[in-house]
Image: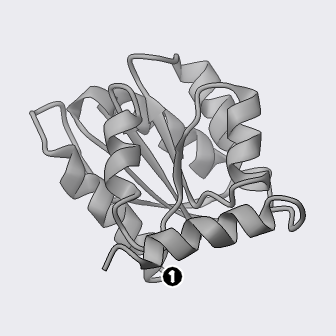
C-alpha cells in the first residue's frame, strides 16, 4: 500500500518507528515531515497528508502528534477526508470497517512504539465494509459538502 505519513516534533520519533516498520512490511511510504524535533506547525503537516490522500498520491495517511487529536481535527477540515484517532485495536478496526477513514492519527504521548506499530499494521489491513454504516457515512459526507 502507498501511504503518506507525517508528524510534528512531538511525534517525530514515533513516526520514524512506524515508518520503518511499515517499510519493512513492503509498504511504500512518502514522508511529508517533519524530519527532526524542532517546533513545527502540525496543521501544515496534516494538510500535506490530507492533500496526498485527496489527490490519490497515497491510498491512506498516518499522522502523529502528541495526542493525535490536533492532527485529526485539522485533517478533517479537508472536504472528503475522514481522519480518526486510533489508540486501541477496536477504534482502529472500526475507523476503517465502519467509518471508512483514510487517515489514522496517533498520539506519541499516549501510546508506545510497539502498540503504534501493531495498530498501524492492523489499520492498513482493514477494508471498509459496506453495510449498516453506509447511510451514516453518506450523511457525514452530506454535511461535509455543506461546509462551503
Say which quadrant the N terminus sits in. Answer: bottom right
User: How dense is the environment of label 1, judged by Cα within 10 Å: few (below 14), some, or many (20 and up)?
Assistant: few
Q: Residue at x 41, y 34 (%)?
A: 68
- Rendering quarter of residue 40: top left
Q: Relative to the observer, which residue lies in front, 113 or 91?
A: 91
> Measured from the top left, where is residue 29 in percent x and y?
50, 59
Is the image coloured rainbow, by chain, by secondary structure, or in one colour?
one colour
Q: Seen from this angle, which residue lies furthest right?
A: 131
Residue 12 visible to an observer of this rendering: yes
Q: Mark 1 highlights which residue?
A: 56
Q: Residue at x 22, y 51 (%)?
A: 43
Position of 72 relative to 108 (above/below): below
Q: Residue at x 76, y 42 (%)?
A: 93
How many callouts does the rendering have? 1
> Measured from the top left, where is residue 39 in percent x and y?
9, 34
Q: What element does badge 1 sit on?
A: loop
Say which quadrant the C terminus sits in. Answer: bottom left
Q: 63 left or right of 89?
A: left
Position of 112 relative to 127 (above/below): above
Position of 137 relative to 64 (above/below): below
> Measured from the top left, where is residue 33 in percent x and y?
27, 51
Residue 122 visible to an observer of this rendering: no
Q: 91 left or right of 58?
A: right
- Rendering quarter of residue 41: top left
> Measured from the top left, where is residue 75 in percent x and y?
37, 56
Q: Seen from this angle, which residue lies furthest left?
A: 39
Q: Residue at x 41, y 37 (%)?
A: 16
Amino acid at each position: 500500500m502507498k501511504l503518506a505519513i507525517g508528524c510534528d516534533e512531538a511525534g517525530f520519533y514515533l513516526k520514524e518507528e512506524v515508518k520503518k516498520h511499515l517499510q519493512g512490511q513492503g509498504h511504500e511510504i512518502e514522508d511529508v515531515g517533519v524530519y527532526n524535533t524542532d517546533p513545527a506547525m502540525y496543521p501544515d503537516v496534516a494538510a500535506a497528508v490530507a492533500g496526498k490522500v485527496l489527490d490519490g498520491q497515497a491510498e491512506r495517511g498516518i499522522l502523529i502528534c502528541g495526542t493525535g487529536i490536533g492532527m485529526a481535527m485539522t485533517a478533517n477540515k479537508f472536504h472528503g477526508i475522514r481522519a480518526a484517532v486510533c489508540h486501541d485495536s477496536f477504534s482502529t478496526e472500526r475507523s476503517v470497517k465502519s467509518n471508512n477513514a483514510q487517515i489514522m492519527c496517533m498520539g506519541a504521548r499516549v501510546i508506545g512504539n510497539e502498540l503504534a506499530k501493531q495498530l498501524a499494521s492492523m489499520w492498513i489491513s482493514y477494508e471498509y465494509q459496506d453495510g449498516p454504516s453506509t447511510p451514516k457515512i453518506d450523511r457525514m459526507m452530506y454535511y461535509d459538502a455543506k461546509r462551503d
